[in-house]
Image (cartoon, rainbow, N blue to C red):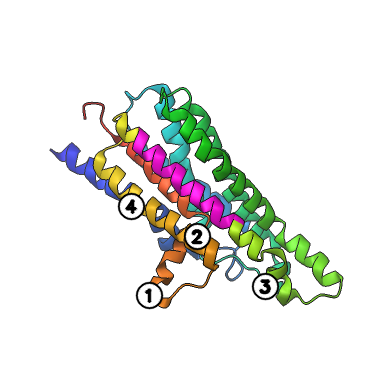
């Protein structure tokens, strides 16, 4: 009985741990504030990842087939990466002030790019998981989903460098955002989010069909992915203008949110007992 209680407690901790760790202690060392530096923040991020993984080891199902185990671990690692991004405790800086500390946004988008690579590696392993006819449909959604991620993270990684060139040509730095990430970039991002949420939704459904995750895990994932896809469609046609009562839905356009959903899939995959 005690083991079951401990297991439930650990699972309850694992689900929100990327948010909890970033808010409760990692944000205190964010290089965005005071004299904090990456020389301290990066080791703290690594320590947080190690602690998260040790907690996982207490509840992981070691009887999982190797392909499923590897997929789950890759998805789980996305949570540790997102905790390091969340721990920055500041939104991306797209103002000319960015030029004083471009390494901050380099770090953010390098980590997002790392998660895109983890996503790609996990998807490649699904070919070994035996998903049959579903594999081609997953591939059709995955390719544009990953392509937009790679483009977007590369695009913003070099934001500071391109802003510096823009200003050196005598242009107003405050106008650079509209020039660099205008309507076309927003539409590209909306298309990417649509495919990302659609891919995650289908992956969740397939995993549940093969009894790799529980139904009660599938339902909230499908709900969140549906909300994300609808938000993407809205932004594609209307841009970032959204009535006040629906502003909360803009959270689904944050590039890290799909990775949080993939992290939850990883937790669900790795902790589901084989007997269920």
Residue 116 included in the magenta stretch of the image: no
> Which residue is labeled 1 in the image?
245
Disc 2 target residue: 253
Residue 33, position as x, y percentages in the image: 57, 69
Name the mark on residue 34: none
User: Which numbered disc flags the more N-terminal residue, 1 or 3?
Assistant: 3
Screen quadrant of the C terminus: top left
User: Element at badge 4?
Assistant: helix
Toward the viewer: 215 or 53?
Answer: 215
Which residues fall within the magenta stretch?
188-206
Q: CA distance from mark 2 to mark 1?
A: 16 Å
Tag 1's secondary structure?
Answer: helix
Task: Identify residue for label 3.
Answer: 95
Disc 4 target residue: 223
Between disc 1 and disc 4, whose residue precedes? 4
Image quadrant for the N terminus?
A: top left
Question: Where is residue 67 drawn, in percent x and y?
Answer: 43, 24
Prevailing secondary structure class for the magenta stretch in the rendered image: helix
Q: Which residue: 61% across, 55% down?
A: 188
Q: Residue 139: horizontal and vertical position, in percent?
A: 51, 34
Q: Nearer the viewer, residue 105 or 129?
A: 129
SS category of the residue bearing label 3: loop
Q: Measured from the top left, where is residue 11 in percent x and y?
A: 28, 45
For the residues marked 4 and 2, what is the alpha-carbon distance in whole angstroms? 15 Å
Rendered position, 12 above or below 4: below
Q: CA distance from mark 1 to mark 4?
A: 19 Å
């Amino acid at each position: 009985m005690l083991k079951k209680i401990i297991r439930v407690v650990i699972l309850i901790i694992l689900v929100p741990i990327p948010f909890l760790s970033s808010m409760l202690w990692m944000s205190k060392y964010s290089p965005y504030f005071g004299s904090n530096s990456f020389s301290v923040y990066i080791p703290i991020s690594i320590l947080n990842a190690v602690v998260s993984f040790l907690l996982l080891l207490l509840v992981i199902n070691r009887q999982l087939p190797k392909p499923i185990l590897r997929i789950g671990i890759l998805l789980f690692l996305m949570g540790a990466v997102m905790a390091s991004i969340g721990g920055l405790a500041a939104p991306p800086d797209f103002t000319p002030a960015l030029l004083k500390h471009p390494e901050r946004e380099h770090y953010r988008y390098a980590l997002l790019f790392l998660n895109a690579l983890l996503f790609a590696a996990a998807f490649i392993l699904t070919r070994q998981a035996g998903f049959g006819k579903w594999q081609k449909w997953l591939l059709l959604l995955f390719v544009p989903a990953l392509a937009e991620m790679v483009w977007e993270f590369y695009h913003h990684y070099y934001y500071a460098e391109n802003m510096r060139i823009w200003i050196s040509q005598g242009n107003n730095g405050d106008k650079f955002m509209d020039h660099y990430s205008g309507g076309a970039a927003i539409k590209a991002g909306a298309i990417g989010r649509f495919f990302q949420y659609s891919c995650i939704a289908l992956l969740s459904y397939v995993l549940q069909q093969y009894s790799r995750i529980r139904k009660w895990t599938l339902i909230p994932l499908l709900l969140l992915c549906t909300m994300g896809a609808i938000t993407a469609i809205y932004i594609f046609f209307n841009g970032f203008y959204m009535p006040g009562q629906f502003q909360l839905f803009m959270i689904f356009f944050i590039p890290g949110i799909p990775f949080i959903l993939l992290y939850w899939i990883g937790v669900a995959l790795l902790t589901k007992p084989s007997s269920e």
